[in-house]
């Protein structure tokens, strides 16, 4: 299945590939919380980045659809 990951803000961390079929990569900074939400607003993935890194997010088991990524830390929110 293909998962479309939408990264709305131009200053947000990079998400690739888009669309993703098996895995997606998300570059995050230390201390950032990450959630992936489906079109209904249900959280389908979440994690906390202890260090700056590129997260490997499994997408193969996600149904085809549109997903939003929410990243926040220290009062800053990206969607």
Image (spheres, rainbow, N blue to C red):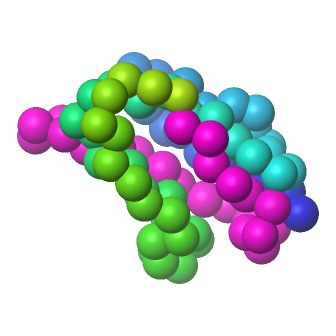
**Which x, y percent locates residue 47?**
39, 54
Residue plotted at (32% across, 28% down):
51
Residue 74, quarter of picture = top left
Q: Per the image, is 1 magenta?
A: no
Q: Can see residue 8?
A: yes
Q: Per the image, is 63 magenta?
A: yes
**Which x, y percent locates residue 26?**
55, 34
Residue 38, compared with residue 33, is above or below; it is below
Residue plotted at (73% across, 69% down):
62
37 left or right, relative to 34: right
Q: Can see residue 12?
A: no
Q: Quadrant of the N terminus?
A: bottom right
Residue 23, compared with residue 50, is above or below; it is below
**Which x, y percent locates residue 34?**
38, 49
**Which x, y percent locates residue 44?**
53, 70
40 left or right, relative to 18: left
- First to last magenta residue range: 55-79
79 or 43: which is nearer to us? 43
Say how many tags the image has: 0
26 or 8: which is nearer to us? 26
Q: Quadrant of the C terminus?
A: top left
Residue 28, compared with residue 47, is above or below; it is above
Residue plotted at (53% across, 28% down):
54
């Amino acid at each position: 299945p293909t998962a479309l990951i939408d990264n709305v803000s131009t200053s947000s961390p990079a998400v690739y590939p888009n669309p993703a079929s098996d895995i997606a990569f998300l570059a995050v900074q230390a201390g950032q919380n990450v959630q992936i939400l489906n079109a209904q607003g249900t959280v389908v993935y979440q994690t906390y980045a202890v260090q700056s890194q590129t997260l490997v997010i499994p997408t193969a088991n996600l149904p085809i659809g549109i997903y939003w990524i929410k990243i926040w830390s220290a009062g800053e929110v990206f969607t």
